[in-house]
Image: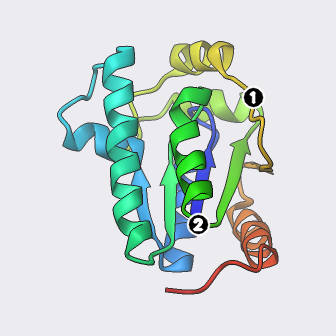
Amino acid sequence: MLIMVSGLPGTGKSYFASRLSQRLGAVYINSDAVRRELGAMGKYTDEVKYTVYEEMFHRCKIALKAGKCVVADATFHKKKNREAFILWTRNNNIPIIILEVFASEEIIRKRLSKPRTYSEADWDVYLKLKDEREPFEVKHQKLESSSNNINFMLEKAHHIIEASHEYKAN
C-alpha cells in the first residue's frame, strides 16, 4: 500500500508522516531527506524538483514491489508531481491512500519561524506554494493539524487505512 502524505510547508505533514510510518512499520520516504541525499539543498528549480520527485517515485516502486507499505511525504502541490505515483499504483493494482494535511496560517507561521531538521521552507515559500497549489482531482482525505493533536491524527489515519480493507501489516 502507498500512503501519500501531502501538505504545504508548516502544516505538520512530515511530523505526522514520520510517526505514521513508525506506527505502521512502513518504509518512510521524505522529499526533504531525498533532496539532501541528492545534494540539492537550496536548489529549487523545476528541474531539480522533478529530479527529487523522480527519485522518490523510484524508491517507492522498489519498496512497493517488495511488498512493503510505503509512506511518501512531500508537498505534492502540483498535479504533475503526484500523477506518476497515482497512475503507477492503479496500473499495478497497488492500494493507495492520499492524506492531505492542513493547518491554520497562525500555526503554520509559528512553525515556519523555527528551524526544522530538513526543510528550508519559510513563510515566503509557504505563500508561493500556496499560490501554486493545484487541488486534488482524486479521492483523498484531509487531516487538520493543530498544536497538540498528533495522536488524534494518527488514530484517524489508522481508521482510514483500516477501512480501505487493503492494508496488511508488514
> Which disc, if any, is residue 94?
2
As helix, strand or loop, the secondary structure at mark 1 comes to loop
Q: Is residue 36 above or below residue 135?
A: below
Foreground residue, 122 or 65? 65
Q: Amino acid at mark 2?
A: Ile
Figure coloring = rainbow
How many numbered tags mark residues here? 2
Residue 16 in view, yes or no: no
Residue 55 in view, yes or no: yes
Earlier-in-chain disc, 2 versus 1: 2
Does the residue at mark 2 contact the one at mark 1 (Cβ under 8 Å)? no
Q: Which residue is mark 1?
A: 135
Dot 2 crowding, Cα within 10 Å, few <14, some 14–19, many 20+: some
In percent of width and height, residue 61 lies at: 40, 59
Quick check: 143 left or right of 26?
Answer: right
Foreground residue, 80 or 43? 80
Instruction: Locate residue 156: give its quadrant.
Output: bottom right
Instruction: Locate residue 94: give its quadrant.
Output: bottom right
Foreground residue, 63 or 45? 63
Q: Is residue 47 above or below residue 58?
A: above
In percent of width and height, residue 58 lies at: 34, 50
Foreground residue, 168 or 115? 168
As helix, strand or loop, the secondary structure at mark 2 comes to loop
| Residue depth check, mark 2 versus mark 1: number of the one nearer the observer | 2
User: Disc 2 to disc 1, how far (Cα)?
Assistant: 23 Å
Quick check: 161 left or right of 17?
Answer: right
Dot 1 crowding, Cα within 10 Å, few <14, some 14–19, many 20+: few
In percent of width and height, residue 145 lies at: 73, 49
Q: Tell which residue pokes out farthest to the front in this image.
A: 91
Residue that appears at 56% across and 38% down: 82
> Which disc, if any, is residue 155?
none
Residue that appears at 60% across and 48% down: 86
